[in-house]
Amino acid sequence: MAIAAVIIFPFAWLQNGLLNITLSILFGEFLMALFSTIIPLSLEYIALRSMSARSFGVVVSMEPVASALVAFAVLAQPIYPRMAIAIIAVTIAAIGITLTEEKD
């Protein structure tokens, strides 16, 4: 992310976007980084320590399914037939892997 910020900086500077930055904008950007990246990745690293790599892979593969369902429930975004098929396929695959996982 730091590299991306350095790369995008000249473009923001050229568009005079840096002159319009206020404290409230910086605070909003900080909150966005906190809730969209810092907290989720920190929780994933904590989970990875206590789960097998296979189980963690299943959980991570279910993230898009959870996102689609939240978008449907909260944002009223429609779930099209292709999306529903994909959600069902990923869910079945995750259940299959979970049921066939060998315990250490």
Image (cartoon, rainbow, N blue to C red):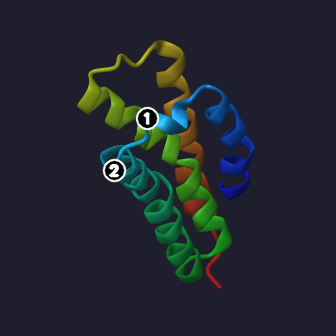
Give the residue type at disc 2.
Leu
Judging from the image, what secondary structure is the residue with disc 1 in? Answer: helix
Q: Is residue 84 left or right of residue 76?
A: right
Q: Which residue is mark 1?
A: 20
Give me the residue at 56% from left, 61% from top. 98
10 Å neighbourhood of mark 2: few (<14), some, or many (≥20)? Answer: few
Image quadrant of residue 39? bottom left
| Percent x, y of residue 96 | 58, 52
Name above or below for residue 23 compared with residue 48. Answer: above
| Percent x, y of residue 97 | 62, 57
Q: Nearer the viewer, residue 19 or 89?
A: 19
Give me the residue at 42% from left, 32% from top. 68
Give me the residue at 42% from left, 39% from top. 67
Q: Nearer the viewer, residue 91 or 71?
A: 71
Name above or below for residue 93 compared with residue 20. Answer: below
Give me the residue at 69% from left, 32% from top. 11
Q: Which residue is mark 2?
A: 23
10 Å neighbourhood of mark 1: few (<14), some, or many (≥20)? Answer: few
Judging from the image, what secondary structure is the residue with disc 2 in? Answer: helix
Give the residue type at disc 1.
Asn
